[in-house]
Amino acid sequence: MKGSFIARNPSILVFLLCLAAFTLVITLMSHAMGTGLVSTSFVKTLGKTLCLCLVAIAMDLVWGYCGILSLGHFAFFGLGGYMIGMWLMYARTELIVAESLSNAAIPPTDQEVVDAIGTQIFGVVGSSDFPAIWAFAHSLPLQLALVVLVPGLLALVFGWLAFRSRVTGVYLSILTQAMTLALSLYLFQNESGLRGNNGLSGLQNLPGVSASQDWVSLWFLWGSALALGLGYVVCAMVVSGKFGSVIRGIRDDEARVRFLGYSVEGYKLFIFTFTAIIAAIAGALYYPQAGIINPGEVAPIASIYLAVWVAIGGRGRLYGAVIGAALVSLVSTWFTGGMVPSVPLGFYAIDWVDWWLVLLGLSFVLVTLFAPKGIGGLFDLVTARVVPDRHGADYGPDKGSLREEEGRK
C-alpha cells in the first residue's frame, strides 16, 4: 500500500487532529493570550494530564499489548522527574547564590559558590556537600541524557534478570512492585542525596526565564501535547506489523511463540525498557508543571493507579489508555479539589475528598466485571467489522478454506 503510515492508519490521524484542536482551543482561551477563559492553574492541570496520558500509553504497551502487568512503571516516571528536577534546582539556586554574592567585598571563588549552592540545597537535611549523583546537575544536556539513561538502565537490568529467569504472571507483578517499594524507601532516606522526604521543590521556576507563569504553563502544555502526539505515533508503529503480532502472541500464548522460534525474552525486554523510557520522559515534563517531587510520588500505589487508568480506558488499545488517564485525572482533580459539595446524610456527611478513592476502586471493579474492554470498547460498537457477503464462497484460494458461515461464528 502506498502512502505514509499515518495515512494508512486513519485512527492515528483522528487522534492527532483531536489533540491539535484541543491544544489550540486551550491556547486561545488561556490567560497568556488575553482571554482568561481558562485559568493558568487549569492550564497546568491539563498539561500534567497530557503527561499522564503519555505514561498510560507506555503502560498499555507493556500490559495491554505484551501482557506484562508491571506495577512499577510509575517509578520510571518519578525517576525522570528527579533527573530533570536536579538541574532545575541546581540552576535556580546558582542564580540566587550568584546574586547574593555579587555585592561581596571580595569576589567569591568557584569553590565558594559551589559550597554555597550545596548549603542552600542540602541544608534542609543537615549537609552541604554534593552527593556523587549530582555530578552532572550543572549541565542541562547531561541531565536530559540521564532522564533517558537512568530509568532505561534500571529497566534493562531488572528486565534482563526477571525475563531470563522466565518469571511471569503475578510473580513478575510482585517483583516490579517490590522494585518500586525499594526505590521509594531508598529515596526517603536523607543519605540518598535527593533530600529525603523533602524531595525537590521550586521546579516550576525555570532558571533564567523571566516570563510569567501564564506563558510558562502554556509552553509546557505545548511540549506535553507534542510529546503525547509523538509517543502515540511511535507506539502505534511498534504495535503494528510483524513486531506487534509477535508481542500480542506473547501476551496470548507465550509458550507457543517461543516454540515458533522467537526470542520471547528479547521482545519482552525491549518493550519493558522502551516503555520505561517513555514513562521517564513523561515524568520529566510533568514535575516542572507540578513544581515538586518527593518519594511519595514513586510509591507502589501510584503504579497501581496507573494500571487502573488503563483498565478503565480499555487496555490493548492506545486511545483507550489516553481516555482512561485523562478521565480519571480530571475527575480526580474535580473531586479532590473541593469543587464537589459534601452530601449531608444527617448521621454522616459524605466528603468526596475522602471518598474519591472508594469511587475509583468501585469503578475499576465495575469495569472489570461488566465492561472488560473498558471505555474504549464502546468504539467497537461503532467500528465493528462487517463480514463481506461472499454467499458461501471460500475465503482463500484453496478449496475448503474458511467459509462465510464459519467466519461469522
Image (cartoon, rainbow, N blue to C red):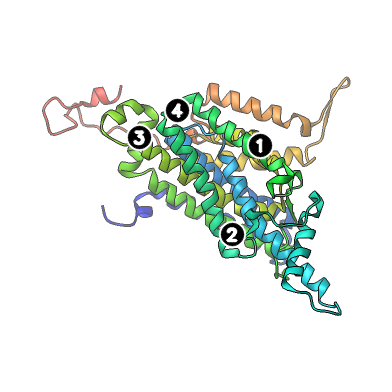
Say what amino acid the circle numbered 2 marks: Gln
User: Can residue 318 be seen at all in this image of the molecule?
Assistant: no
Q: Residues within 10 Å of mark 3 (few under 14, many from 20)?
A: many
Q: Residue furthest right?
A: 346
The residue singled out by tag 4 in the image is 167
Q: CA distance from mark 3 to mark 2?
A: 33 Å
Identify the residue shown where x is 55% and y is 45%: 55
In the rendering, at what x and y percent does residue 318 appear?
47, 42
C-alpha distance separating marks 3 and 4: 12 Å
Q: Which kind of residue does numbered mark 4 sit on?
A: Val
Between circles 1 and 2, the one closer to the viewer is 2
- Residue named by callout 3: 264
Q: Amino acid at mark 3?
A: Val
Side of 161 relative to 210 (left or right): left
Q: Nearer the viewer, residue 247 or 212?
A: 247
Nearer-N-terminus badge (1/4): 4
Q: Secondary structure at mark 1?
A: loop
Horizontal and vertical percent position of residue 28: 64, 63
Q: Which mark is residue 143?
A: 2
In this figure, which residue is indicated by the disc labeled 1?
Answer: 299
Q: Which kind of residue does numbered mark 1 sit on?
A: Ala
Q: Nearer the viewer, mark 3 or mark 4?
A: 4
Residue 92 visible within the image: yes
